[in-house]
Image (cartoon, rainbow, N blue to C red):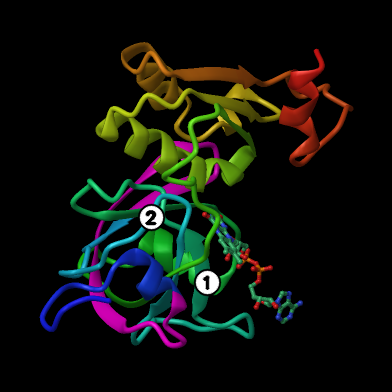
């Protein structure tokens, strides 16, 4: 139970059937790998989330629209300690992503969320093993950033695979986090363009048996 006037806790927020939708502005965008863009949105006051949750982003008054719509879901790749909401995506030639690449900064979007329970347990003390392939790194980067802020004792092993090094978003940052954060073990794998092995999450999983 919580008293009147207290902020809802995350577990209560997760159970809300309809999450509030807030209007935010696009503040920045920058490439983080080949054909891959990070974008930063204003973080609405009181918008709390756990690392691993996602938000739905809808353009307001977009300059163009196609039959795929103006809404997409993205994991929040910033940590709850960060001032802005950062998201990241592979670019494709469709309206939502053309807008993302070209619309002037300051453009407005609606953010719904946070949603999802793909989050690390607060209680667990056993090492967490995290596997990511490509753009699937987005929620795990949020976790790695959060754990670095939190200075917890729980060890985390992060395996990260991409076909090529230039396809790997946030690679340098994750190496830097590993160096400053002794409980984060980080293993990156990018076999190169000739790679014909497993794809998807099986690619980083293969590292476990290598
Ligand atoms: C929880 C969650 C988190 C996610 N996090 C990320 C993330 O961090 N980064 C990221 O890049 N992506 C993420 N995604 C995926 C993201 O939402 C997009 O689906 C993805 O970026 C691909 O977008 P797209 O527009 O290229 O194509 P799609 O997502 O394939 O298409 C978008 C929409 O168009 C519809 N559609 C597809 N094909 C057609 C067609 N031929 N005709 C008409 N409609 C069609 C689909 O049903 C869908 O509603 C996440 C998805 C979920 C569910």
Dot 1 lies on which element? strand
Viewed as shown, does residue 143 lie left or right of 152? Answer: right
- Name which quarter of the figure residue 62 lies in: bottom left
Q: Earlier in the sequence, mark 1 or mark 2?
A: 2
Q: Which residue lies at the image location 43% right of the left edge and 25% below the top edge? A: 174
Residue matched to label 2:
50
Q: Are marks 1 and 2 in contact (CB under 8 Å)?
A: no
Instruction: Magenta stretch: give its range.
Output: 15-39
Q: Is residue 143 above or below residue 151?
A: below
Residue 44 percent across, percent down from the top left: 20, 69
Q: Main secondary structure of the magenta part?
A: strand
Q: Is residue 198 left or right of residue 95?
A: right
**Residue 123, quarter of the rendered image:** top left
Of 41 and 101, which appears nearest the observer?
A: 41
Left or right of 72: which side holds 51? left
Of 50 and 141, the residue lying toward us: 50
Q: Residue furthest left?
A: 5
Quadrant assignment for ligand 1 = bottom right
Ligand 1 within 8 angstroms of badge 1 C-beta: yes
Expressed as whole percent of the image width and height from the top left, the position of residue 102 reads 37, 62
Q: What residue did someone put label 1 on?
A: 72
Residue 128 x, y percent position in the rendering: 56, 32
Mark in the foreground, 1 or 2: 2
Check the image and report above or below for 5 versus 45: below
Observer-nearest of 65 and 175: 175
Instruction: Check residue 179 for magenta coloring.
Output: no
């Amino acid at each position: 139970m919580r008293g009147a006037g207290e902020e809802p806790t995350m577990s209560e927020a997760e159970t809300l059937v309809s999450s509030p939708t807030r209007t935010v502005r696009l503040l920045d965008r920058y490439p983080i790998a080949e054909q891959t863009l990070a974008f930063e949105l204003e973080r609405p006051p009181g918008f709390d989330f756990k690392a691993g949750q996602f938000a739905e982003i809808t353009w307001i008054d977009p300059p163009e629209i196609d039959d795929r719509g103006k809404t997409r879901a993205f994991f929040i790749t910033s940590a709850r300690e960060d001032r802005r909401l950062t998201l990241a995506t592979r670019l494709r030639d469709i309206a939502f992503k053309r807008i993302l690449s070209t619309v002037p900064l300051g453009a407005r979007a609606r953010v719904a969320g946070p949603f999802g329970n793909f989050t690390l347990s607060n209680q667990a003390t056993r090492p967490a093993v995290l596997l990511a392939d490509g753009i699937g790194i987005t929620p795990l980067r949020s976790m790695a950033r959060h754990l670095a802020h939190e200075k917890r004792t729980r060890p985390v092993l992060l395996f990260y695979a991409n076909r090529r090094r230039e396809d790997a978003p946030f690679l340098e940052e994750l190496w830097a986090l590993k160096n400053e954060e002794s409980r984060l073990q980080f293993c990156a794998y990018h076999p190169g363009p000739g790679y014909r092995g497993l794809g998807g999450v099986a690619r980083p999983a293969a590292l476990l048996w290598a």
